[in-house]
Image (spheres, rainbow, N blue to C red):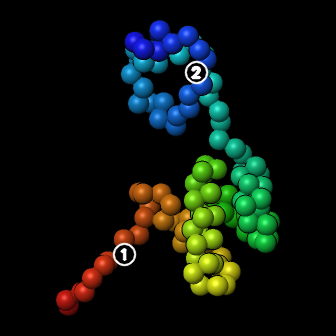
Amino acid sequence: EELENFEGILAATTNLENNFDLAFERRFLFKIKFQRPKLSAKAKIWKLKFPSLPMWKCEQLALQFDFSGGEIDNIVRKNEIREIIHGKPTDFNTLLLFCQEEKLGKRTITEIGFNKK
C-alpha cells in the first residue's frame, strides 16, 4: 500500500519474479525482463574479469557455468583472496572448483573436525 502513496520514481530489481504476490506485482507500472547474456557475451565477461585466461578457457567457463555477473564477481573475489594468501596465481582447476562451489545446490561439503573410522 505504501507504494501507491509514493510520489517519486522507484526502480526495483529482482531475480525472484516468480515469488511475487500478484497484488504486489500490480503496483509496478512498468516491468522489464532482461535476458541472460548469450554464450559469447558471457565468455567476454569472463575474459574481462580474468584477462590472463586464454579465450578458449573463458568460453569453457561460460559454457559450463550459467553465472550472473555478480556470481562471476564472487569467483573473482575468491581468486583474489587465494592469491593474496598463497602469494601465487590461482590455477585453472582451482578456478573451476570455485565455480562449482558457487551454487548452493552444487556445493561440495568439506567435513570439519576429526573423522573416526
Residue 83: percent from the left, percent from the top? Answer: 63, 78
Q: Residue at x 47, y 9 (%)?
A: 4
Residue 18: percent from the left, percent from the top? Answer: 44, 30
- In the picture provided, is 13 more to the left or to the right than 42? left
Confirm or deny contact between disc 2 and disc 1 (CB under 8 A): no
Q: Nearer the viewer, residue 100 or 81?
A: 81
In primary-sequence order, the first of circles 2 and 1 is: 2
Residue 81: percent from the left, percent from the top? Answer: 58, 72
Q: Say which quarter of the image contains residue 89.
A: bottom right
Instruction: Residue type at mark 2: give it.
Output: Leu
Q: Residue at x 63, y 64 (%)?
A: 76
Q: Say which quarter of the image contains residue 80.
A: bottom right
Instruction: Residue type at mark 1: give it.
Output: Thr
**Residue furthest bottom in the image:** 117
Crowding at dot 1, Cα within 10 Å, few <14 / some 14-19 / many 20+, comes out as: few
Residue 56 can be seen, yes or no: no
Q: Secondary structure at mark 2?
A: loop
Name the mark nearer the viewer: 2 or 1: 2
Up/down of 6 relative to 65, above or below:
above
Crowding at dot 2, Cα within 10 Å, few <14 / some 14-19 / many 20+, comes out as: few
Q: Residue at x 59, y 84 (%)?
A: 86
Q: Residue at x 41, y 30 (%)?
A: 19
Residue 40: percent from the left, percent from the top? Answer: 77, 51
- In the picture provided, is 116 more to the left or to the right than 108? left
Up/down of 99 relative to 1, above or below:
below
Residue 88 can be seen, yes or no: yes
Determine which of the numbered discs, if any, sits on residue 36 in the image. none
Where is the N terminus found, in terms of image quarters? Answer: top left
The residue pinned by badge 2 equals: 10
Q: Nearer the viewer, residue 80 or 56?
A: 80
- In the picture provided, is 81 more to the left or to the right than 114? right
The residue pinned by badge 1 equals: 110
